[in-house]
Image (tube, rainbow, N blue to C red):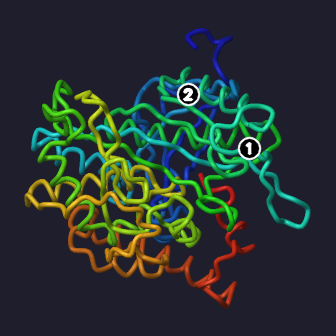
Amino acid sequence: MSKASEQPDFLRLIFSDLLGFTRSIEVGYDRLDEIVEHGLVIDGSSVPGYATVNESDVLLLPSRATPLSQPWDPSAAFLICRIHEVSGEPHPRDPRNILRRIVSRAEEKGLKLMVGSELEFFIVARRTDDTIVALDDGGYFSSQPQDVGLDFRRDIVRTLRNLGIATTSHHHEVAKGQQEIGLQYTDAATAADNIMLSRIIISEIAYRRGMIATFMPKPFANQNGSGMHLHQSLWGIDSSRNLFATTGDSSISQLAMTYIAGLLEHATTLSAILAPTVNSYKRLVPGFEAPTRVAWGYRNRSTMIRIPHFNGSKKAARIELRCPDASSSPHLVIGSILAAGLDGVERRIEPPTPTDKNLYESGVTLRSLPGSLESALESLEASTLMRKVLGDSVVDSLVTLRRREWKEYVESTRDPGVSEITEWEIDQYLHVN
């Protein structure tokens, strides 16, 4: 884009709010130097969690100086931005700033979190009566013609590759219309940015194809919901050694055990961040391949944390957290789980015995994940750890904003325990990204 004739018309500044919604504002591309040097002051009072109407200004500062072209829309190039106070100080409720602060804590201990993700989503159409319908009848690993999304996913993967985002695989998931794209593991901050960008790309390319790609966790009551499984490992600060690996074949290290213990101890507290919407808790129910119990196990997909088989590869030793979904803020999610895992490491907590039982069918008594957003918010509000690592203002803002959401849902449905997917949920969450 060095030649004027190759420059796009617009510069798109991308950021996210405290709830994880991706926001953007565009200026003329000819303002690039000005934006890089000084940033852009915007009204933050209408962006959840950032400012009040009487102190509304916040500052967008690009994280890099060189824009990235949009392969799906060459008329604009984009820069990912952080939110700062107008004084220049990092805004305490910007998810990217929060993650960066927690990552720095880990680095002080010589630890680096690496994260890979599985993004699940549906491709759907909305009917004239406002109900939605899946765009194919495929199932797990379906091929064409049942897999209508194959060419679409290939477009996504090519676009991600052009932006330097590596993928692992893509395929049709279990439910009708359900897709999955795996993102290669990378450092925590980059992984969160990659998830945010991937949601934008998937949503906007789908829109250009005349369909809807939705990250709504549970759009159909009688089918599996969509998760965002996060594969995690702690490495040395120089990235030369995976500290979750041992000399054994498919076992994990004592460090990994204490990290798991931290995640399990804080599971109910984390829920309001990992599964942040009313609709999230209609996914986390028995019988639809989503975890409901606070447990871990080797190769056990009914547990909250699974240790995948990695055939003795030290590079591949990892844990998989299965309760998050992609309606969440990837930066807050990764920051929060890193903080919980580090708490386990620092306190040397021992995890409970791993389970090999099918927890959807077993009579084993185990602690359950919260059954509703209301219950999850109560745990978050009372959490000493989350208040310490995120800050009181972040926790209080999250609880206030999501409780407002819960109240609207209850007033709309008059039955907060209904298992069906309501019109309110479709209106609220269909286009979350």
Give whichever of discs 1 and 2 has the lower sequence position: 1
> Toward which corner of the image does residue 375 lie, by quadrant?
bottom left
Given residues 4 and 127, the one toward you in this image is 127
The numbered dot on residue 130 is none
Q: Secondary structure at mark 2?
A: helix
| Residue 404 percent across, percent down from the top left | 54, 80
Q: Secondary structure at mark 1?
A: loop
User: In the visual, does 408 lie left or right of 63?
Assistant: right
Q: Quadrant of the N terminus?
A: top right
Q: Which residue is mark 1?
A: 138
Q: Which residue is mark 2?
A: 160
Residue occupying the far top of the picture: 3
- Label 1 close to label 2 by CB (< 8 Å): no
Q: Which residue corresponds to the image point at 43% horizontal and 36% vertical from the top-left?
A: 62
| Residue 137 percent across, percent down from the top left | 78, 47
Residues under labels 1 and 2: Cα distance? 24 Å
Residue 88 shows up from this direction: no
User: In the visual, does 427 lie left or right of 187?
Assistant: right
